Amino acid sequence: MSLVSIHEVHKYYGDLHVLKGINLNIEAGEVVSIIGRSGSGKSTLLRCMNGLEKYDDGTIILDGKEVSTDEFQIRRLSESVGMVFQNFNLFPHLTVGQNIMLAPTLIRGMSKPAAKELALDMLGKVGLADKFGQYPEKLSGGQQQRVAIARSLAMQPKVLLCDEITSALDPELVGEVLKVLEQLASEGMTLILVTHEMNFARDVGDRVVFMHQGKVWETGPAKDVFAAPQTAELQQFIGAVL
Amino acid sequence: MLLLYTQGLCPCGIARMNYQLNFADLLNYQDVLLSGLWMTIKLTIVSTIGGVLLGIAGAASRRHRNGFLRRAAACYVELIRNTPFIVQLFFIFFGLPAIGIKMSEIEAGVLAMVINLGAYLTEIIRAGIDATPKGQIEAARTLGLSSRQIFFRIVLPPAFARVYSSVVSQCIIVMLGSAVVSQISVPELTYAANFIQSRNFLSFESYLVAAGFYLVLAFVMRLGLNALGSRAFSREEKPA
């Protein structure tokens, strides 16, 4: 069974039909890039996958658990799925270390020393072990985003959702974040990214999902999709962004 | 002004300028004065702590999922903000015994102060909570935190830090407002000043000294609470 199976998912914002019957299966270890114009529903789809948005019809099964916005279910899901946001969303009143240790101690019931070791380990992974005692506001955007990734990884999720995680960064800081993602991909982490980084989608991603008008318009292996787009809409989109 | 002069009101004013200050006679009452000061300090400490806790509970209720709690907290805030403190105090001390709720002067005074401060702090802290970026709550949910954990660990601490200076000001207002509880004979600073001037008729000196004490108290309280705040909300690097 797929790690993520999305079946006939519909979502409305009032009268606006934003997801129009999405079907998508994602296997463990895959790196999937969801691309498309703004308003195509890609962020909404991602946010439906971990219960941040409610979908109105269809089913999403993630790691064998049905996704819903019920608080208890979101907590269960948090064991399987992590999320990194465009605006980092680090907790400003906690140090980098405390940001990472919070969920493992509260949710996993980990002891403080064990959580600290884990936090240092995760910070090492993103190259920021020396920032453990620092507050987020003292870090650059790229560093904050790497801490946010480390914070998600500390919960040992099976899949990491990334919602335009480089869009709020200065261009010179994008690289350091993408490098971390690339390393995670090479370690076999399942990544689902909503992204505008087409080079990354093509070079690191396994599969590309092109969304258009609330539908999965075209999907396929990353290299093929970019080399030989099948639909006129994707051709146009690629032409505009590359 | 000229009119006042011609009407002879000025000589009367000038005559008062000859008043001889007499602080020495206040010294006979220094025990009364100091115990009044101490009572004011105790009232302030207890009502500040109680009021802050009530304000947090109130703010949490104002933003709770439960609609009944939300409405109850809103009613509480409006009821207290739109009635005079002295009426609240009299209602608690003189009114409640009619339905069998009796308490001492001090208990009634503290209760009135806590309820009053709690209402104002509910609104102040709620404003701080409303300024929380939505993304932080989403990040916390994604990490698996419960609503309660999110409120106490993610939302409240920065919200409180955000509005801390308003919280301090409100606590000082309530400290100064504690003068009103002299009206139900709580032996605090204003009560002491009243008491002294009724014995020796040195109204000018008694109230001047009381005012001086309040001024110093307010000043020290602001300094102390600000120092406490900058310590608690410091974002200096912490050793790993």
Image: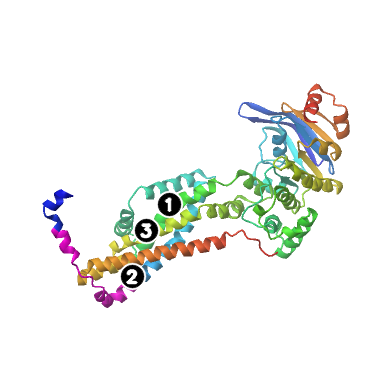
Percent x, y for residue B136?
63, 47
Do the residues indicated by labels 1 and 3 lie within the same chain of the protein? yes
Q: Is residue B22 magenta?
A: yes
Query: Which kind of residue does numbered mark 1 sit on?
Result: Tyr
Q: Which mark is residue B36?
A: 2
Between the residue at mark 1 and the residue at mark 2, the CA separation in whole angstroms equals 26 Å
Chain of the residue under the numbered disc 2 shown in the image: B
Which residue is label 3 attached to? B112
What residue span does the magenta drawing correspond to?
A: B11-34
Dot 2 falls on a residue whose secondary structure is: helix
Q: Which mark is residue B172?
A: none
Percent x, y for residue B23?
26, 73
Percent x, y for residue B48?
44, 61
Question: Between A200 and B182, which is closer to the camera in this rendering?
Answer: A200
Between the residue at mark 1 and the residue at mark 3, the CA separation in whole angstroms equals 13 Å
Residue at screen point 15% across, 56% down? B10
Percent x, y for residue B52?
47, 58
The dominant secondary structure in magenta is: helix
**First reached walking from the N terminus: tag 1 or tag 2:** 2
3 vs 2, front mark: 2
Question: Between B204 and B50, which is closer to the camera in this rendering?
Answer: B204
Q: Which mark is residue B120?
A: 1
Q: How is the image coloured?
A: rainbow
Chain of the residue under the numbered disc 3 shown in the image: B
Crowding around mark 1 (Cα neighbors within 10 Å: few <14, some 14 to 19, many 20+) is: many
Crowding around mark 2 (Cα neighbors within 10 Å: few <14, some 14 to 19, many 20+) is: many
1 vs 3, front mark: 1
